[in-house]
Amino acid sequence: MSSKNYVLLVDDKIGFAEELKRSARPHNIDIVHKTNFRDMEVILPSIASKLTLIVLDIKCLKEPNQPIEGEDFLTIALSLLDEKYKELPRAILTADAEGFSTVKTWFPQEKLYKKIPGDIEALFNYITQKGLELENIKIKNKYFNVFQIFERGHVDISIENELVNLIKNMHSDDLSQIKSNLVTIRRVQESILQTINKLDKSIVPDSCFKPNNDVKFWDAHKHLGGNKHRRNNHQPTQTEYYSGVIKVFSECVYKVSSDNGAHNPYLNPAYQPTSFTVQAMVYSLFDLLLWFKTTV
């Protein structure tokens, strides 16, 4: 199963937009709809990193309460995209036959589609193609089970972006990048614990955090492991939330990422961490994320 492709549609025809949304779902395409340029401009900063494509009408409203379509909508929309979202693929979808010919002449580099069944199907195929080409989407497809976590909305979008960049950089042999990757790994691990605390304080209680909300990892680690104690023959004295390899991975990820990256000064051993160290920690982190998904 692959990740969805997310598309922003800017078209003031609400009925058409709803119909297009329904038609797109079997293609694993999820459409976010806006009716005007201003709303498009406002929403783009928060969703651009998730989008596969943006679809524009030729004539559309520029402001939410504008009574008629703006003839220059497409020009200002393309200008915004060229200036701030140059890497974001786009297409133009219209029922305006005259406008179609004009845009084809003046904007020959743009992908143009008519609001007819054959062209709409071609647009869906193009979206699917672009999704497979985009590096971020390719990463999310490859590690789909891991990235499903972020679709729930529990974990901040910034952590998803950090994880994507971490995967992109995990094969780097540059020592400064290796240490930066290890810092990111610890930050993602701590975010998991902070998120569990927000969702269920019985699993990770408030006592596992400092007043500034920094994680007291070893307190959380002991609690998740069932608060084992020698007086109880090292058996759990409460619910044990860790399962299988997770306890070992959690401790390993924290120690390696802290001692070799996050701590300042970090350890400076004769044998430095390598890209293989980072990859081992990334895959261990994946297991922690999958465990998180089953825990909350």
Image: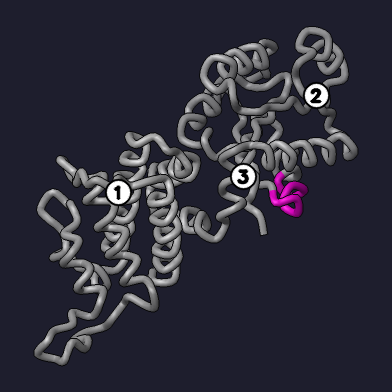
Dot 2 or dot 1, earlier in sequence? 2
Magenta segment main secondary structure: helix
Taking the view exactly as shown, the residue that stands out farthest to the top is 106
Residue carrying label 3: 138
Q: Residues within 10 Å of mark 1 (few under 14, many from 20)?
A: some
The quarter of the picture where residue 203 lies is bottom left
Taking the view exactly as shown, the residue that stands out farthest to the front is 270
Q: Amino acid at mark 3?
A: Lys
**Dot 2: element:** strand
In the image, the segment drawn in magenta is: 21-28
Residue carrying label 1: 187
Q: Up-down: is 212 above or below 130? A: below
**Dot 3: element:** helix
- Foreground: 105 or 3? 3
Q: Residues within 10 Å of mark 2 (few under 14, many from 20)?
A: many
- Tell me what residue is drawn at x 47 percent, y 53 percent: 150
Tell me how far mark 2 sits from mark 3, CA to CA. 25 Å
- Residue 213 place in picture, x, y as percent: 17, 52
Q: Which quarter shows the C terminus? A: bottom left
Q: Amino acid at mark 1?
A: Arg
Residue carrying label 2: 112
